[in-house]
Amino acid sequence: MNSLTIAWMALPFFAGFIIYLLPKLDRYLALGITLISAVYAGSIFLYPSALDLKLLDNFGVSLTIDELSGFFILTNALVTLAVIVYCWESNKSAFFYMQVIILHGSVNATFICADFISLYVALEVISIAAFLLIAYPRTDRSIWVGLRYLFVSNTAMLFYLVGAVLVYQANHSFNFAGLRGSPPEAIALIFLGLLAKGGIFVSGLWLPLTHSESETPVSAMLSGVVVKAGVFPMLRCALMLDEVDPIVRFFGVATALLGVGYAVFEKDTKRMLAFHTISQLGFVLAAPIVGGFYALTHGLVKSALFLIAGVLPSRNFKELHHLPLNNSIWIALLIASFSISGFPLLSGFGAKVLTSKNFLPWQVIAMNIAALGTSISFAKFIFLPHEKSKMPGKIKPSFWVAMVILLGGLIIANVIYYEAYTLKNIIKPLVTIAIGWLAYLIIFKQAAVKLPRMMEQFDHLIGVMSLMLILLFWIVWTRLQFSI
């Protein structure tokens, strides 16, 4: 298994090099790599014992592969597979597929890293690959959005690197377990980098513009898997160290409320989905022990929603009310919206039930409010007009194959937590959804609130990092018992 893991980890980068040399094989090699990742993820669940590797002892690479890794790797495999299939009939160049598969490999690497330096390398490769995909159209707008993402990401990772050095200074190891006994400033610096990278709380306000202005398949990748590269290490640390768990849960709740607060008032489809990505990442962090299952369902549904948003006749909800959707498109949109709202028969229901069962008492009210906000947000899609009409010419068969992969995955994933289907568990989300729909129809549909975008500006994003560092240091100093 050790040799298999190392080969699997290196294969995407080797395939990217081959795509550069043999561009005619681009789609086939990329497709093959994602299928191999899906098989590897399946093997993790078939042989659930955790695998720990130390390739270069404390100074080098530490890897941990377990069920948590399996959920994230499977998410990455299915989302990347759907994106490649979606682009199959497009005119994307070999360079595009090369970057997609390098991004896929580097994201997988973050899901098995157990030391801060290996994680740093993987996150930086993600930044470069994501930048190249965002800037792929080579327009002035796409290049600026890509550079903005790269600058914010690299600034955050500088803080992270300083924190990693302080952890080594305290423990002579870069392993995640070295957080115990490290000074408060080390933990604050590392978490600042991960919060920004994962799009968490106010550090994630770079995300709406980046995701909404990227090409449709790139938005699906960013929202479905890339932001989870920053979330996963926080889950891993929370599960390893009880002292870190309260910090992760706190930011989970704060993020869920912040994202949904913006989403309910947003009038642009892709920006709404981007804000809701922030909110749903909060759900992943709010209950670390089951965060892997929630990440899987979110990755599938959010990628599907971004791909669907790319074929809608307009990005403006007001205009969409005067442009009836084709019934087939609306049904796909309905299934995805139902899943993320927690409707039974889709895995979003099981994920929400399982997550809610692992909330601490102080989290319950806030997360129920976030769940209600989710229902309000996606009522915007559910109540769009639709009719039986001719399918728009820009929708190709590959779009429907991608939908089968993503939406089919939401149905099949029900088996992971089939125990959720009890009368008590079913009634609560149905009531929440019904209240959310009524609130949308009575209040939010007519609301004309426009939230300011000042905090999304580049200079504010950098400035907020200083404030977040102070907040993190205060939380670590006052709530945890790390040695100082």
Image (tube, grey):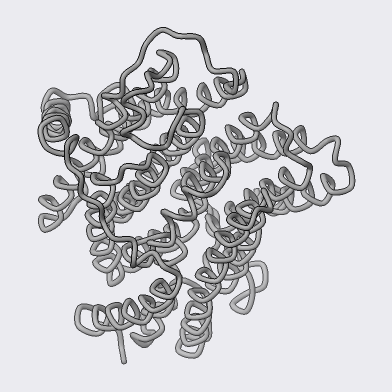
Q: Residue 365 at what x, y percent from top left?
A: 10, 51
Task: In this rendered view, identify the residue nearer to me: 59 or 478.
Answer: 478
Whether 340 is drawn above or below 382: the answer is below
Residue lying furthest right? 21
In this rendering, position of residue 190 left or right of residue 431: right
Residue 171 vs 52, above or below: the answer is: below
Quadrant containing the C terminus in the rendered view: bottom left
For the point 34% across and 61% down, which residue is it?
453
Q: Is residue 367 left or right of residue 203?
A: left
Q: Position of residue 298 (x, y in %)?
A: 39, 40
Locate residue 320: give its quadrant: top left
| Viewer-nearest residue: 303 or 147 | 147
Q: Is residue 401 above or below residue 145?
A: above
| Quarter occupied by residue 170 | bottom left
Q: Is residue 15 left or right of residue 90?
A: right
Residue 103 location (% of width, % of height): 64, 52
Is 250 positioned to the left or the right of 319 in the image? Answer: left
x 44%, y 49%: residue: 68
In the image, what residue occupies the spot 45% across and 9% down? 389
Could you tell me how many numbered marks the image carries?
Answer: 0
